[in-house]
Amino acid sequence: MILGWKNFKLTMGLPSPVELSPPIVLQPSSTQKKVRKRECSFTETFLKTLIRSGRTFVYPFTPLSIMSDKASLNFGDSTYSLNVLIGSENEKALDVRQLRKDSGLITFDDGYGNTGSCESTVTFIDGDKGILRYRGYDIAELAEKSNFLEVCLLLLNGELPSSQELTAFESKVSRFQTLPAEVLHAVQSMPGGIHPMGSLASGLQALGGACPHLCTNDRAQDIANFEDAAALIIAALPALAAANYRKKVGEELRVSDTSLNYCENFLSMMFAKDGDAPVNPALSKALDVIFLLHADHEQNCSTSTCRMIASGGANPFASLAGAVSALWGPLHGGANMAVINMLNDIHNSGDDGSKFIQSAKEGKSRLMGFGHRVYRNYDPRAKILKSACDQALEALGVSSPILDIARRLEEVALQDPYFIDRKLYPNVDFYSGIILQALGFPTDTFTVLFAIGRAPGWLAHWKEIAQTGKRIHRPRQIYQGANLRPYLSIENR
Ligand code: CMC
């Protein structure tokens, strides 16, 4: 039986859940049953059933182009001919899918720097040219003309929504921000020392537990109900973050206000007190831009984690909880905190940034928020955030000494041969932390903000795997451990 919202037990006078659309329960046709037996549930027949149900959108891959030129690999007495594949932006890849079968060799690429793990239609990056596009749209144009919820639909469905689709999505997300009481209770009952990212990951799993029909691990059901699951997750993340924060600072939960837009509502759930003036639109706009700029970044650590989990058949809630955990680390989503800590340290030491730059050049420290594995040119998101930062601080009417230091660091670094030669430019984290701090977010919530922004990207990748993935992700390894040896009884060790 599929549980509906009415089955939830309300506790503690916390907000009541809102109505979800009736769950779709797919009865597999005899063809699909046969297909399932062959463990391949993503057939054309199956996708057609979903499309007919009007609840899903399949963004097709065009068949991969193969170059007429082949690569060849000589090993021992044999020569192996390898196809060269071309993507839609002309990137080329050696096709090694048959290599192990044909030669017994595997490829070794520690850290995956040279490995294409999938085909994807979601995001294109050209790091040398500083290009970032979601579904073909340039990030700067989206930041100027679109907004976060519209970009969510673009990423999830592959196309910009009509105004009716956008309005329906906005109202659904707004309604879903009132979370089931048992989920809020679960978040607020966690140990006081839990990090906001730990709370967020656990909160997502709790949310899945509160709506089991959206996370069945039956791929057909999970795809059929994906629209609701995606809207619920996008709606829930700010509410989960606010529930954790309010508990930490000892304040009552604030119920979601459906008259506010997504970012205004988040700022209100986090910080508002009765009688406060409405949120300044310039500030909610700055937050919206931060979310939009983080919405996807192709196969980064957390997104690859999400896809890996999804490839095993796990539902969106479990896959995103894993992605949140992957994002937590300081080399990934945690860098925005490190920038603020660095700027504060420079400020507190009385340095204007010059001494710090010198120590970074001598390898004694790292200029956090500078450099990127992919971008060898200016990170296009940093440019946009730099001016968003100026606007947000102007709207708040505050001057920030750490912004002055950040500007000086950038100015000096961009003229210094050390940074020029190494192609080190500001990345997305250089200015985002300054805006978030000015908005009142504590540093340990910065990565949570990154997660809220990245959720539509993770969901789009979950959907892509769910609809087109054929095999569980399972890399190989080069074993470097002990060879076979006999068991030693404990008294002989
Ligand atoms: N400050 C000073 N020197 C640097 C920096 C930096 N921020 N980044 C790289 N270098 C130097 C590095 O010492 C090395 O010099 P040398 O050739 O003399 O040994 C050279 O530049 C190449 O560095 P790398 O570590 O090989 O570059 P990478 O591609 O492996 O690392 C990075 C990329 C982002 C981890 C690194 O630039 C870094 O640690 N930056 C600071 C942390 C940061 O801002 N991270 C956020 C990344 S953006 C968030 C996201 O998109 O997920």
Image (cartoon, rainbow, N blue to C red):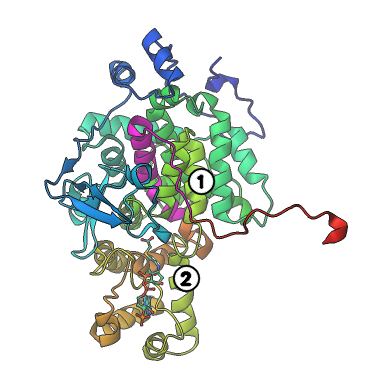
The numbered mark, 2 or 1, whose residue comes first in the sequence reads 1
Circle 2 packing at 10 Å, graded few (<14), some (14-19), many (20+), is many
Residue drawn 39% across the image and 23% down it: 41
In percent of width and height, residue 480 lies at: 55, 60
For the residues labelled 2 and 1, the Cα–Cα distance comes to 22 Å
In the image, taking residue 83 as reference, residue 310 lies left or right, namely right
Relative height, residue 479 to residue 54 (above, below): below
Work out which residue is located at the far left of the displayed protein and give it.
Answer: 68
Residue 407 seen in render: yes
**Splitting the image into 4 quarters, where does residue 433 fall?**
bottom left
Q: Is residue 133 above or below residue 465?
A: below
Q: Amino acid at mark 2?
A: Ala
Dot label at residue 338? 2
Element type where label 2 sits in the image: helix
Q: Residue 304 in the image: x percent, y percent? A: 41, 48
Q: Who is closer to the viewer here, 121 or 100?
A: 100
Magenta residues (range): 448-477
Answer whether residue 177 is visible to the viewer in this image: no
